[in-house]
Image (spheres, coloured by chain):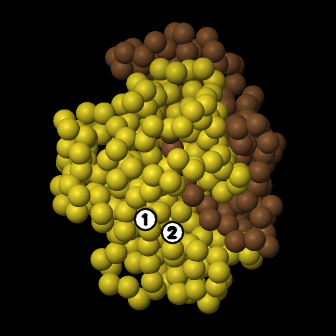
Chain colours: A brown, B yellow
């Protein structure tokens, strides 16, 4: 891990990033995993290249995915893991490769090793299918006074959702 | 409701939502917006919720590459018009930046487009599902392409940049904002937000103008049909 960190730092310096300053601001002892928009410190996770290994007792609270006999399940959805590829996903010590699973379900992910942060996005097909269900995706955001509003509060009224920006 | 896609947060948004004094809209923009002097002088603070979306989650959820865009949602929470430019046109691309003037025919077309869109909203408010602008479920689905794999990857890069920025790792964040921009150079929300974070005002500066020029004949704002069986030439 030391040499991997050193390599990352070298690459980052080549990008002219002041990462020494940045590194002081992040907890170097754990990996931060953002899943479904929520960032959580995964104390027992370890990264190796493009793989992220997590113990199962961290996997479920962070991602909602749970290992079951029929595969990896979340809610009513189960994704079977092919027996011949099991080693790709499960280590002998029981840890699970979340990055391999993301690749398997076409889920985009990125990681910034200098900050030990991994971020998992939404598979494009899931976003497309959700929109084509025609159910407006809910969200909760603050106004200028910090009051939080959810789209779902306006059920029973027509809503014109209009985006803009100051820039 | 309005949603400001603004990583700069409340500080960036406040001068527009609660201006201390009337906002000085540049003449070419006023020409495109088509407000009368009375309307301009009579503008009041909005009474509807004005929300702030620092992470651009609404843009990701509704697949919005640009601003301003609108989605129409009925009383049951169902989309009756998917994300589309809210009356905006490409006329601004012909702005002469030296004289800050816009050809009158383009300004007129811009005003007409915005007026058509505003009138369509009013028609829907009055007539609901019977409005000819409330699309059928089949038409809504047909208009939803959904994000591409590259879009989804760029969205992840942008989200990572925001997380790093929130944690104070600004130089690392800048790299990932840039990565999102390079992955999807025509997702203007990424491009312009990244430029704005580099330098205030840069979102409309030389790099943006160059990117617009490189679009060539391709539209900046997608053309839409207001009616379900339109000709594809509106807006």
> What secondary structure is marked by label 1?
helix
Q: Compared with residue A34, is residue A10 higher up or lower down, i.e. above or below?
A: above
Q: Position of residue B166 (x, y in %)?
A: 62, 27
The numbered disc on residue B118 is 2
The secondary structure type at the circle numbered 2 is helix
Residues A17 and B127: in front is B127
B201 above or below B31?
above
**Contact check, label 2 and label 1, Cβ < 8 Å:** yes
For residue B114, the mark is: 1
Badge 1 sits on which subunit? Answer: B
At x 60%, y 20%, the residue is: B168
Residue A49: x and y in percent read 50, 33
Q: Is residue B46 visible?
A: yes
Among the 4 quarters of the image, the one containing residue B206: top left
Residue B6: where, in percent of width, then height? 55, 39
A149 vs A19, nearest the viewer: A149
């Amino acid at each position: 891990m030391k040499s991997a960190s050193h390599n990352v730092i070298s690459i980052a310096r080549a990008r002219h990033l002041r990462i020494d300053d940045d590194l002081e601001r992040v907890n170097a002892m754990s990996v931060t995993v953002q899943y479904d928009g929520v960032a959580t410190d995964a104390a027992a996770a370890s990264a190796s290249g493009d793989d992220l290994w997590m113990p199962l007792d961290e996997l479920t609270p962070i991602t909602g995915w749970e290992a079951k006999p029929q595969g990896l399940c979340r809610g009513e959805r189960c994704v079977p893991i092919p027996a011949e590829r099991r080693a790709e996903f499960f280590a002998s010590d029981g840890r699970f490769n979340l990055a391999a699973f993301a690749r398997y379900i076409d889920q985009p992910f990125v990681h910034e090793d200098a900050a030990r942060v991994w971020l998992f996005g939404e598979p494009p097909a899931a976003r497309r299918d959700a929109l084509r269900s025609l159910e407006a995706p809910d969200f909760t955001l603050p106004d200028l006074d910090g009051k939080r509003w959810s789209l779902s509060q306006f059920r029973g009224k027509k809503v014109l959702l209009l985006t803009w920006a100051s820039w | 409701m309005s949603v400001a896609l603004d990583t700069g947060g409340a500080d960036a948004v406040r001068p527009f939502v609660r201006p201390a004094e009337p906002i000085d809209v540049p003449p070419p923009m006023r020409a495109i917006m088509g407000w009368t002097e009375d309307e301009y002088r009579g503008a009041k603070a909005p009474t509807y919720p004005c929300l702030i979306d620092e992470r651009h989650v609404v843009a990701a959820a509704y697949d919005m590459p640009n601003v301003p865009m609108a989605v129409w949602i009925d009383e049951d929470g169902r989309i009756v018009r998917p994300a589309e430019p809210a009356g905006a046109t490409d006329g601004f691309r012909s702005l002469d930046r030296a004289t800050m003037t816009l050809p009158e025919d383009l300004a007129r077309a811009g005003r007409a487009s915005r007026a058509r869109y505003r009138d369509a909203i009013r028609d829907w408010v009055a007539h609901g599902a019977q409005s000819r602008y409330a699309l059928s479920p089949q038409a809504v689905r047909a208009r939803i392409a959904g994000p591409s794999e590259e879009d989804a990857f760029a969205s992840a890069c942008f989200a990572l940049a925001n997380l790093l920025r929130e944690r104070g790792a600004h130089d690392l964040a800048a790299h990932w904002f840039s990565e999102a921009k390079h992955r999807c150079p025509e997702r203007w929300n990424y491009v312009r937000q990244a430029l704005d974070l580099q330098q205030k005002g840069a979102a409309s500066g030389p790099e943006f103008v160059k990117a617009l020029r490189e679009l060539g004949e391709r539209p900046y704002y997608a053309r839409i049909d207001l009616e379900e069986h339109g000709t594809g030439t509106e807006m």
